[in-house]
Image (spheres, rainbow, N blue to C red):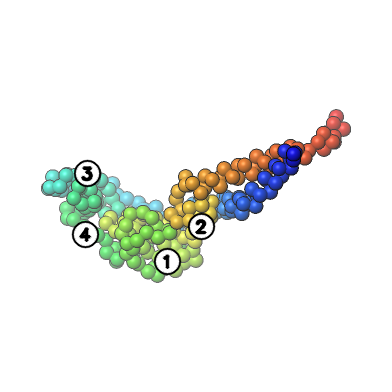
Amino acid sequence: MAKPIVWMRKLHKWIGLIIGIQVFLWILGGTVMSILPLDQVHGDHLHKPVKQLAITSQQRQAAGAILNTLDAPIVAYQVKSVFNRPLLVVNTESSPSLVFDLNHSKPINGMTEQEISLNAMSIYTGDGKISAVSLINERTSEYKKSLPAWQVTFDDSTATAFYFNPHTGELNSVRNRQWRVFDFFWMLHIMDYQERENFNHPLLIICALIALLLTLSGVYLLVKVFSKRDFSWLTKKR
C-alpha cells in the first residue's frame, strides 16, 4: 500500500495541472488590479466635480404644484439640480421617468445631442475633443446601467467615454483605458466571462475549492519534506 505522502504528491501534481492556470490568473489579476490607481480606473481625473446650485423655496413650490397636477399615482419623486438646472424627476405607475424644468414648470422630453455635448465639455478635463455622441439602447461590456443612455467618446490618450442619463443629463459612468484593463482582469479573476459581475457562481466556487485542496496538499507535503536537521542551524546559534 502506498504511503500517504506518495498519493498526496500525485494528488498535488494533478490538482496543480488542473487548476494551476487559473491560480496564475488570480495572482496576475490581483497584481494588476492592485497596481492600477483606483481613482484613475474610475476616471475621477478626467472630469471636474459637477457643482450644483441649491434648490430655492420658489422652485420647491413649483415642484409641489406640478405634483398636484399629475393624475397617475406617484411612486417616487426627487427635486435636484443637474448642471445648474433645477429638475423634478417623478416616477409614476404609468411612466418610469417624468422630468420637469422647475425654472419654467415645463416637462423636458429628453436631452438633445447638443445639450449632452455641452454638459460633457463643461466637466471634461482630458487632452482631447469629442469624437462621437450617440444614443445607445443596448448594454455593452463597459456600460450596464439604465438604458437608453447618451455615450460621448473623446479622442484622447485614454479613449475616454462618458455616459449620461438621457432624461436628466446626469453623468452616469466614466470609462477609460485603465478601467477596461481593470475590468478585463476582474473578469478573469471572478471567472464571469459574460456579465463580469457575479462572483458567486458555481464555476468560481468549484475552482476555489479545488485551489484550497491544492493549498492543503501543498502544506502537507511541505511539512513532510522537512526534518529536524533542516532546522539544526537554529539550535547551533543558541
**Which three-letter amino acid code belongs to the residue tagged 3?**
Val
First reached walking from the N terminus: tag 2 or tag 3: 3
**Which three-letter amino acid code belongs to the residue tagged 2?**
Phe
User: Residue 203 appears at what percent x and percent y?
Assistant: 51, 49
Q: Are marks 3 and 1 in contact (CB under 8 Å)?
A: no
Which residue is the site of mark 3?
Answer: 75
Which residue is the site of mark 1?
Answer: 154
First reached walking from the N terminus: tag 4 or tag 3: 3
Q: Mark 3 against mark 1, which lies toward the viewer?
A: 3
Distance of mark 3 from mark 1, alpha carbons?
Answer: 37 Å
User: Residue 49 appears at what percent x and percent y?
Assistant: 39, 52
Residue drawn at x 54%, y 51% is: 189
The answer to whether 183 is drawn above or below residue 219 in the figure is below
Residue drawn at x 74%, y 42% is: 6
Which residue is the site of mark 4?
Answer: 109
Residue 184, label in figure: 2
- Asked whether residue 150 appears in the rendered view, the answer is no
**Which three-letter amino acid code belongs to the residue tagged 4?**
Asn
- Asked whether residue 101 appears in the rendered view, the answer is yes
Distance of mark 2 from mark 3, alpha carbons?
Answer: 38 Å
Distance of mark 2 from mark 4, alpha carbons?
Answer: 37 Å
Q: Mark 1 against mark 2, which lies toward the viewer?
A: 2
